[in-house]
Image (spheres, grey):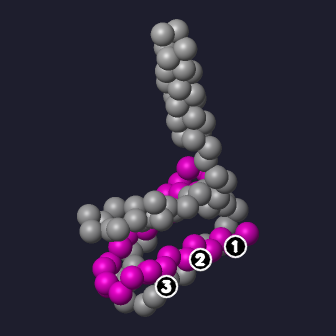
Amino acid sequence: MRACIVVERLGSVIVPVDVRITFDDGSTTDEHWDGRNHWKRFEYTGAQRVEWAVLNALPLDVNWLNNSRMRAPGTRGIVRLAGRWGFWFQNLMYFLTGL
């Protein structure tokens, strides 16, 4: 099996970054990219599949939401936030209608 990770520099600032890649068996590998080119491809061959890849968090990064990708989308956080929002909204409506 072949796995491919592509890291892309969206801006014009050249900054070296570290990439941590986690496989489905729990093993991880750390890669370094100097950031000089607009993109860098990391390829792996073996039985394991890539679960997710994450860049180190740079303090000057404008958008921290694009620093990681998962093979399967994680919905656990969204469900938890929607539950909390629904709980507080329901209590607010109960309070407002009781006045």
Q: Is residue 5 magenta?
A: yes
Which of labels 3 and 1 is toward the front?
Answer: 3
| Inter-mark Cα distance, 3 to 1 | 19 Å
The residue that disc 2 covers is 43
- Check disc 1 and give the amino acid type: Arg
Q: Is residue 10 magenta?
A: yes
Q: Is residue 66 above or below residue 16?
A: above
Residue 87 shows up from this direction: no
Q: Position of 45 compared to 88: left or right?
A: right
Residue 55 shows up from this direction: yes
- Check disc 3 and give the amino acid type: Trp
Name which of mark 3 and mark 1 comes first in the sequence. 1
Q: Is residue 96 above or below residue 41?
A: above
The residue that disc 1 covers is 2
| Inter-mark Cα distance, 2 to 1 | 7 Å
Magenta-highlighted residues: 1-28
Mark drawn on residue 39: 3
Q: Tell whether label 1 touches label 2 (CB within 8 Å).
A: yes
Which of labels 3 and 2 is toward the front?
Answer: 3
The residue lying at 56 percent from left, 50 percent from top is 26
The residue lying at 52 percent from left, 31 percent from top is 85
